Image (spheres, coloured by chain):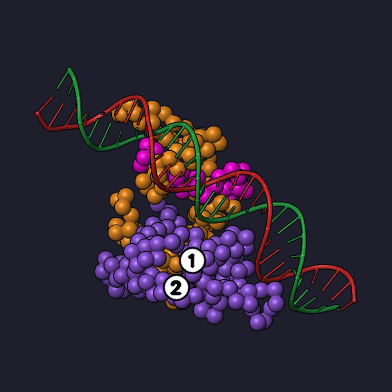
Chain colours: A purple, B orange, C green, D red
DNA sequence: CTGAGGTGGTGAGAGAGTCTGACCAACTCG
DNA sequence: CGAGTTGGTCAGACTCTCTCACCACCTCAG
């Protein structure tokens, strides 16, 4: 795992670079109360809302941890919880107004970083990268 | 950041898949006292030894955090600290005997996972993936 | 060769994030 | 209906990370 850079580490480096940039951009846009852990959960909320258990599973954490983070996101106004009409036990976590604005801000940063990467790699290789990663997702993402 | 899977998340998914597999493999091989945080530091120790400050910078954490993790790694026998002949203040963190064995074990798991990915993507695209990521490293890895 | 500023590292304390174990309420289905 | 499953919470503990403060050693200009 040490010497010859393995693919795992090669994946991690740009991932962290992207994450860092998004956090900087978010903070600059006034969304400075956003922790990495919160973001990793927030990122997975479906547009129609998601259950806590789903979020926990997709983020790879326990439902207790997810609940803890969603509590914070709710207090900060990023999300809201509404009863799930389909299941009396469950509540749906949905993106609230402030959350939607933060999504927009982060979307802009992502586009900016992707543009830089494209400038460095070239259109063709950037597209290849995306294609290959999407393909790889089939065997590395348990959630479809 | 939410709907259309951005490249950041696409990178993260296989990264985490790799990490999970390596941890499972390590635990199965008797290296069960290894936390993700420790591993992220351990992974960056150069074969000639590294200074704490270097490790901290490369892992993106404070030197105090790095010191905390190296303490644990040292107690578990994965690394050892030796005085740096070139600088009286510094000490070099080096991989100890048990650490070397764990590197070997993780190397096997990495090879196994890479083989699975190659089987899924094909030789050519796997090589492209590695090439593109290596290239991308130039603008996303501050450490060369 | 000496003193100022930089660098390598440690210590203490606090806060965030995560986990396990125990539990309750609502759902599903034979 | 009753047994088992699933969505979620509560409590407590541990790990990781940070900031602030500090010391020891190094470097280099004067």
Q: Is residue A140 magenta?
A: no
- Residue drawn at x 33%, y 26% as measured from the top left: B88
Q: Secondary structure at mark 1?
A: loop
Distance from disc 1 to disc 2, alpha carbons, whole Å, reads 9 Å
Report the chain holding disc 2: A
Quadrant of the image containing the N terminus of chain B: bottom left
Tell me the chain of label 1. Answer: A
Q: Quadrant of residue A84?
A: bottom right
What element does badge 2 sit on?
helix
Position in image of residue D22 (x %, y %): 37, 30
Q: Are marks 1 and 2 in contact (CB under 8 Å)?
A: yes
The stretch of residues the image draws in magenta is B25-54
Numbered label attached to residue A98 = 2
Q: Nearer the viewer, residue B50 or A108?
A: A108
Q: Residue at x 60, y 69 (%)?
A: A52
Q: Residue at x 40, y 62 (%)?
A: A32
Crowdedness near tag 1: few (<14), some (14–19) or many (≥20) residues, C-alpha within 10 Å: some
**Residue B4 picture quarter:** bottom left
> x and y percent of residue A69 in the render?
55, 62
- Please name the residue that numbered disc 1 is placed on: A76
Pick the front one: B43 or B91: B91
Residue A103 sits in quarter? bottom left
Q: Is residue D30 left or right of residue A11?
A: left
Relative depth, front residue between C19 and A23: A23
- Vertical comparison of A64 with D21: above or below: below
Percent across and percent down for residue A51 are 61, 72
Label at residue B124: none
Q: Would residue A78 be visible to someone looking at this image?
A: yes
Q: Are marks 1 and 2 on the same chain?
A: yes
**Does the magenta portion include B39?**
yes
Q: Closest to the observer: A69 or B46? A: A69
- Residue B21 image point, x, y percent: 55, 56
């Amino acid at each position: 795992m040490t010497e010859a850079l393995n693919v795992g580490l090669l994946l991690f480096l740009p991932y962290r670079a992207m994450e860092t940039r998004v956090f900087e951009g978010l903070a600059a846009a006034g969304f400075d109360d956003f922790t990495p852990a919160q973001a990793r959960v927030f990122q997975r909320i479906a547009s129609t809302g998601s259950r806590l258990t789903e979020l926990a599973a997709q983020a790879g954490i326990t439902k207790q941890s997810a609940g803890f983070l969603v509590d914070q996101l709710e207090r900060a106004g990023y999300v809201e919880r509404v009863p799930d009409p389909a299941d009396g036990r469950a509540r749906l976590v949905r993106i609230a107004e402030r959350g939607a604005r933060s999504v927009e801000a982060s979307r802009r940063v992502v586009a900016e970083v992707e543009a830089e990467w494209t400038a460095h790699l070239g259109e063709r290789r950037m597209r290849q990268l995306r294609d290959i990663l999407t393909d790889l997702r089939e065997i590395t993402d348990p959630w479809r």
